[in-house]
Amino acid sequence: MDDLPALSPDPAAVMRAAMTDDASRPEARSPRGFNDRRGRDVAAERAILNAVSGVYERWGFEPLETGALEYADALGKFLPDADRPNEGVFALQDDDEQWMALRYDLTAPLARFAAQNWETLPKPFRRYAFGPVWRNEKPGPGRFREFWQCDADTVGSARPEADAEIIAMAVEGLEAAGLPAGSAVIKINNRKLLNGLMTAAGVDSEGQKLAVLRAVDKLDRLGADGVRLLLGEGRKDESGDFTKGAGLKAAAAERVLAFTAAGMGGRSETLARLADVVGGSAEGDEGLAELSAIDAALTSLGVGTDRAMFEPSVVRGLEYYTGAVFEAELLLSTQDDKGQPMRFGSIGGGGRYDDLVARFTGERTPATGFSFGVSRLASALKAAGRDLAKATRGPVVVIAFDSARMADYFAVAQEIRAAGIAAEVYLGTSGMRPQMKYADRRLSPAAVIVGEDELAAGTVTVKDLDLGRALASQVADNAAWREQRPGQQTVPRGELTAVLRRIVDAG
């Protein structure tokens, strides 16, 4: 008997024991930086994606889906000898001991895909993509570890007109997503202008260049005086902390500030002012020529300065972008959750990145693109009082009176769905009033009542919940309300879907 194997515990018995043991129950909680989203938020983001995807396809961009996991070295963020490349991304080891990581954006997978399939792709390759991305960073207000992005990119064209097309398409896409014309502006700069500025200002070390660019990037927050200090010896903030400056001489610092101030007025006027500051350097002149071509293309596409402007203070991806850079800024007045005014700022951006595919091929491949966070844009619309989720509605609810009649209720629901209207049968065990409350909480347009009398007479009773909600705000006498039963009508069964269609369309 001692040689008999031990019996495995009964899984059901283990589960029952755990259910009675408070200490063994896990706490129901979401990981930090990962959000649960219900129907309203999901529907709002889905509406944005559908609208923007339609724009991208009209411009001739094809959809591309890549996997959630990429090999870590393909993401380009880590050293080959890293023991576990988990800073910034969520990584795991494959069965062949290669490190894989959840993608942290949609551009690195595009670069890998383009390099892997370049011989068979149409060139230039124009694609758009959307999906979740993951970042292993400390979460905070408005900063998540999982969120959705939507990108459009052109790979294989070095023409400035490719940048202009991406910009114009971004303008149209944001407006299609729900932003009125003129409520957002794309601000455009060029890294070559910044490099030309460094040459004109006598800045040659990489460390000093980065210090200058970081100072310029703080212009919106600190103003010209604060940036002037950061361009010089440094700045002490309100708390007393000191930030070391770039160490420029006064004349060089004023030249940088003149560059940042050149963005007022129309695009051609901005180009003229920029030429006075950076003209004469090889890279500066090249950047000016590219912006001039972008200006001409945007003008022909009907995109004016109110929707896309040249802004020399825009600094993005200091070690990533190689030419044009652009950032979409929300101009609408926005409020936080407490109703207080706030500045929402950037809702998307992009630029030219001609070195990314070369990581795989060794050959420079021009590329340009634009990306926005779907959740961030939905939040921006909500903060501006343009919440797309307001249009979200539930299904028509078929009230269930008698469990013996469930087949009849399902037949009614299927008839409604066949007419293209969302419907469900109530599958709880509550009575009539809780079922009506359920339908109201679902924001259902109508409830369908099929009792014994209706079944016998071949009729159905339809309660227009949209009308009921509208009239409820005007009720002064509850007894009269119950007597009148507003929005309720009994119709022949054959007229059910037509009645429902009128209710749904009116909503």
Image (tube, grey):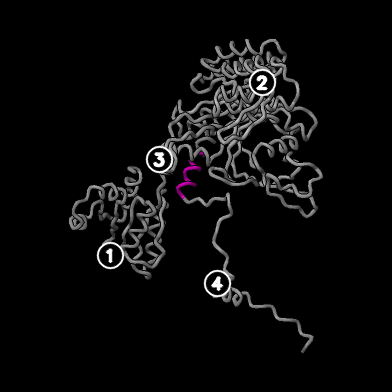
Specify few, some or many for label 2: CA neighbours under 10 Å numbering under 14, 14-19, or 20 or more.
Answer: many
Q: Main secondary structure of the magenta part?
A: helix
> How much space separates mark 1 and mark 4, taking CA atoms?
52 Å
36 with respect to 91 (left or right): left
Do labels 1 and 4 touch, CB within 8 Å?
Answer: no
Give the residue at x 74% y 38%.
76
Do labels 1 and 3 touch, CB within 8 Å?
Answer: no
Do labels 4 and 2 touch, CB within 8 Å?
Answer: no
Q: Is mark 1 on a helix, strand or loop?
A: helix
State the image coordinates of residue 118 (x, y, percent, origin top left): 74, 33
Q: Earlier in the sequence, mark 1 or mark 3?
A: 3
State the image coordinates of residue 313 (x, y, percent, origin top left): 59, 23
Residue occupying the far front of the picture:
240
Q: Nearer the viewer, residue 420 or 457?
A: 420
Q: Which amino acid does label 2 sit on?
A: Leu
Q: Is mark 2 on a helix, strand or loop?
A: helix
- Label placed on residue 22: 4
Q: Which of 267 and 88 is in front in this view?
A: 88
Residue 124 visible in image: no
Q: What residue type is labelled 4?
A: Asp
Q: Mark 1 points at which residue?
A: 456
Quarter of image, res 289: top right
Q: Earlier in the sequence, mark 1 or mark 2?
A: 2
> How much space separates mark 4 and mark 3, taking CA atoms?
41 Å
Q: Mark 2 points at which residue?
A: 194
Q: Name the residue under label 3.
A: 339
Q: Give the range drawn in magenta.
A: 39-48
